[in-house]
Image: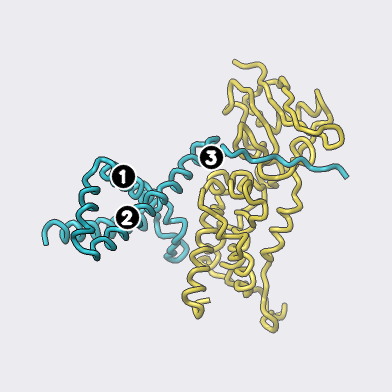
Chain colours: A cyan, B yellow
């Protein structure tokens, strides 16, 4: 019985196509979003310990390393949200009779909700 | 104006070769020719041993899927004029073992298709006698699954899916879309049986939503959508078991 030939998938498969590359970038954003969540937990933990423990953390937050990390994490979170909102119509299908609800309405509703929540947070942080 | 175009074709003979190689053929260029026409010309005029699958030549049978310049395509729908000036590299579909030249081994794909029970199932005692006529369906009920029923089993989605390449046991886009096609059919009563297969470890939860399966689908079936909807359904079943 002749043996079929098995082709190996190269480790660089994600560099062979633009779509694969941007998929990997989307996956990579989760690392930064996850790291930011850990940082938030550490902040809360240090805050609970009182000002002697929180002071050095506040100093570190003002270093270029910290500002750089926050900038990258923000870009990663935005890219993740942008791509996730764009993919939503594939996950949630709402039908009105025979027709699907137009994807733009579904995506638009999520952007609107995001804008309202963001505006609410900005108001709480800066104006309350 | 080109008079000829080059095709670099993947060759592998299981009895003679330990490794595959590429063979270049000079083929007459015709504006209305597709890659399949060029391969047929090679077989008829240059090398009769060239092995590949094809049948209808019109994007219906799903037999002639190949990698054309690295992208899964129906070779009957890939026009030479879109690849000028060439050369065009033709390979067997990715993520499948190669039987010979451009022919892939289909066994695992066929088993996966069967595993989702791709037919209407009525529960015992629920089958209507023939004298009562057909199971009627409204246009809205038809619309729920119609898109997923357009699949021609061409396997381009499997070749585009990197998860398939990394995990050959993955149930894969077409089989999951086919399972969803029957789950969404108002005449069917075996949704929970199928969800056991579709929501198993080697099925929907292996999918990382690359989305290329839907991009390469020649029939706009949107298997990526079917998989994400199955994930959503599976979560609902877990959180709200009474909603099954």
Distance between the Cα atoms at labels 1 and 2? 11 Å
Of badges 1 and 3, nearer the viewer stands 1
A22, B159: nearer the viewer = A22
A90 displayed left or right of B152: left
Residue on which the image places disc 3? A14
Residue on which the image places disc 2? A39
State which tag comes first along the sequence, 1 or 2: 2
State which tag comes first along the sequence, 2 or 3: 3
B38 versus B108 height, above or below:
above
Looking at the image, can residue B187 be seen? no
Cβ–Cβ under 8 Å for marks 1 and 2:
yes
Residue at coordinates 66% horizontally, 20% vertically from top-left? B5
Residue under disc 1 on the same chain as residue under disc 2: yes
Distance between the Cα atoms at labels 2 and 3? 30 Å
Cβ–Cβ under 8 Å for marks 2 and 3:
no
B199, A92: nearer the viewer = B199
Residue on which the image places disc 1? A69
Q: Helix, strand, or loop for circle 1?
A: helix
- Binning the other alpha carbons within 10 Å of mark 2 as few (below 14), some (14 to 19) or many (20 upward) gives few
Which picture quadrant has residue B94?
A: top right
Q: Helix, strand, or loop for circle 3?
A: helix
State the mark number for residue B127. Answer: none
């Amino acid at each position: 019985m002749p043996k079929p030939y098995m082709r190996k998938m190269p480790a660089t498969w994600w560099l062979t196509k633009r779509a694969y590359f941007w998929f990997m970038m989307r996956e990579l954003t989760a690392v930064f979003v996850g790291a930011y969540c850990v940082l938030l937990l550490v902040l809360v933990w240090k805050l609970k310990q009182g000002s002697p423990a929180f002071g050095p953390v506040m100093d570190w937050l003002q270093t270029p390393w910290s500002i750089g990390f926050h900038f990258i994490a923000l870009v990663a979170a935005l890219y993740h949200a942008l791509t996730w909102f764009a993919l939503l119509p594939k996950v949630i299908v709402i039908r009105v009779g025979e027709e699907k609800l137009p994807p733009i309405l579904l995506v638009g509703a999520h952007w609107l909700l995001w804008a309202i929540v963001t505006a609410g947070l900005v108001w709480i942080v800066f104006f309350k | 104006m080109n008079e000829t175009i080059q095709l670099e074709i993947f060759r592998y003979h299981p009895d003679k070769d330990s490794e595959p190689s590429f063979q270049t053929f000079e083929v007459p260029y015709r504006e209305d020719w597709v890659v399949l026409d060029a391969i047929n010309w090679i077989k008829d005029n240059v090398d009769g041993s060239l092995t590949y699958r094809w049948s209808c030549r019109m994007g219906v049978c799903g037999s002639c899927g190949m990698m054309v310049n690295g992208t899964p395509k129906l070779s009957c729908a890939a026009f030479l004029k879109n690849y000028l000036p060439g050369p065009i590299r033709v390979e067997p579909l990715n993520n499948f073992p190669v039987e010979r030249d451009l022919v892939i081994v289909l066994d695992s794909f066929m088993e996966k298709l069967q595993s989702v029970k791709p037919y209407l199932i009525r529960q015992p005692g629920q089958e209507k006698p023939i004298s009562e006529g057909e199971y009627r369906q409204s246009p809205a009920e038809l619309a729920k699954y119609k898109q997923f029923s357009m699949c021609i089993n061409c396997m381009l989605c499997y070749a585009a899916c990197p998860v398939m390449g990394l995990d050959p046991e993955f149930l894969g886009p077409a089989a999951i879309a086919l399972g969803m096609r029957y789950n969404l059919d108002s005449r069917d009563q075996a949704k929970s049986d199928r969800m056991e297969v579709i929501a198993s470890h080697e099925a929907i939860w292996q999918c990382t939503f690359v989305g290329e399966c839907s991009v390469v689908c020649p029939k706009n079936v949107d298997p990526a959508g079917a998989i994400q909807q199955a994930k959503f359904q599976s979560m609902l079943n877990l959180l709200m078991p009474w909603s099954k």
